[in-house]
Image (tube, rainbow, N blue to C red):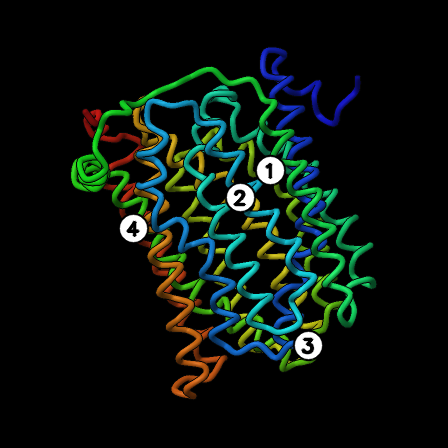
Amino acid sequence: MWFPFAGLVPPDVRTAYKRDATAGILGSMMTGLTAPFVGVIARKHLHASALEISLLSMAPMAGHLLSLVWANMMEGRPKMPFAVWPWVIGRSLLVLCIFATESWRLVAIFSAMYFIASIAHPAYTAVMKEIYPDCDRARIMGYARVCTILTYVVVTAVASPLVKGDSYRYVFPFAAVFGVASAFRFARIPTAKVDGVSEVPLHRFVGNGLMILRDDPGFRWFCAGIFVFGFANFLATPIYTIYEVEIGVDTTWAGAYSIVAALTMTVAYFYWGGYTDRRSPQAVIAVQTLCFAAVPLIYCFATKPWMLLPATIVSGIVNAGLELSYLTGVLHFAPEDRVTSYQGIFLSLMGFRGIVAPLIGAALQQSGVLSARTIFAISAATIVSSALVQVAGMRRYGRTSSRAGTAG
């Protein structure tokens, strides 16, 4: 049976690709029905506070902070269940949106969903490592993402006029059906590898994970650059939503932004997939983060909803590349038997920045210490500095890694 881009995928991984892409399509149906609208609904219709908006940004990162714990649980065990069941449980919570008549309830439901679903990330990385060959991984994942994003565009366009008033209380629970179906479809990808040592105590596993940053300087610089970039981005993230509402953005505009960003991501995936496979992850991410600095700068000068369209285009292009670069970057440094450890320490660092930065941004905005435009300017300047950190690490350590020893 014909499937998009399947003919461009090596025959031995074609079945895995089809199931991965189908799971992505179903997941994007859930995302398209929810993600573009939840922040605007929380702020504009339910009058969520700056702190509540920041919680929506923090929740996925809070789960990442415990990634070494999740990774330790997965060691020596099949990884697929650790990807599937957090998705099933987390996405099922959207059914509770029928009761979300106050901002704190809506924020709590989505925060819990994001937190629980984030448990799947280390296992998902290990599955991607197993099912796709190193030389073609980013390209094949790019094909799957194109299928996902095109679905997201269609669903968002359909949902945008439907999510009005309190209709989200029925649309969001409906979206949960697709999210759960996505997880079960992903579970059908054939996997067999069981790596790591299940007997390693948590404290020793965490200690060995932290030693990766000491023993693998290339990976340390790689993480440092991404940490700085993410901190700068998350500093401004809750302020973006608040500022958008202030200049007149509603659910229609929010849907339009998501569609424009998704369409640009679709085109960008074709470029970034091959580009990422051919070059060092440090170089790729340096280029991507430098381009992303334009996003907060555009917000600095925007006074009407339409003026944010260039920012959505830039973010769509760059985010497509960053998604591939982060995963392939970790796999570039990680030895075969330490993928979950590397991903665990990487996500833990990302989780810390994702918790602290939105709180700082929200506190600065709500207290009036800094204006929204000042926060955007600081974010842009810090993002530029993150690209310099990535370049410094690349020049010092090149494409090599010390490959920290195997945890025992």
Q: Which element carries disc 2, helix, strand or loop?
A: helix
Q: Earlier in the sequence, mark 3 or mark 2?
A: 3
Q: Amino acid at mark 1?
A: Tyr
Query: In the displayed structure, would residue 329 be above or below residue 199?
Result: below
Q: Amino acid at mark 3?
A: His
Q: Nearer the viewer, mark 3 or mark 1?
A: 3
Give the image location of residue 403, x and y in percent: 23, 28
Q: Residue furthest bottom?
A: 368
Q: Residue furthest top?
A: 12
Foreground of the two, 94 or 149: 94
Q: Earlier in the sequence, mark 3 or mark 1?
A: 3
Quadrant (top left/top right/bottom left/bottom right) for the C terminus: top left
Determine the CA span between mark 3 and mark 2.
33 Å
- Left or right: 203, with 287 as reference point: left
Q: Amino acid at mark 2?
A: Gly
Asked whether the viewer can see residue 289, the reply is yes
- Count residues near mark 4 (Cα–Cα under 10 Å), then give few for <14, some for 14-19, many for 20+: many
Query: In the displayed structure, would residue 101 be above or below residue 271?
Result: below
Q: Which element carries disc 3, helix, strand or loop?
A: helix
Q: Which element carries disc 1, helix, strand or loop?
A: helix
Give the label on residue 321, or none.
Answer: 2
Q: Nearer the viewer, mark 1 or mark 4?
A: 4
- Left or right: 406, with 27 as reference point: left
- Count residues near mark 2 (Cα–Cα under 10 Å), then give few for <14, some for 14-19, many for 20+: many
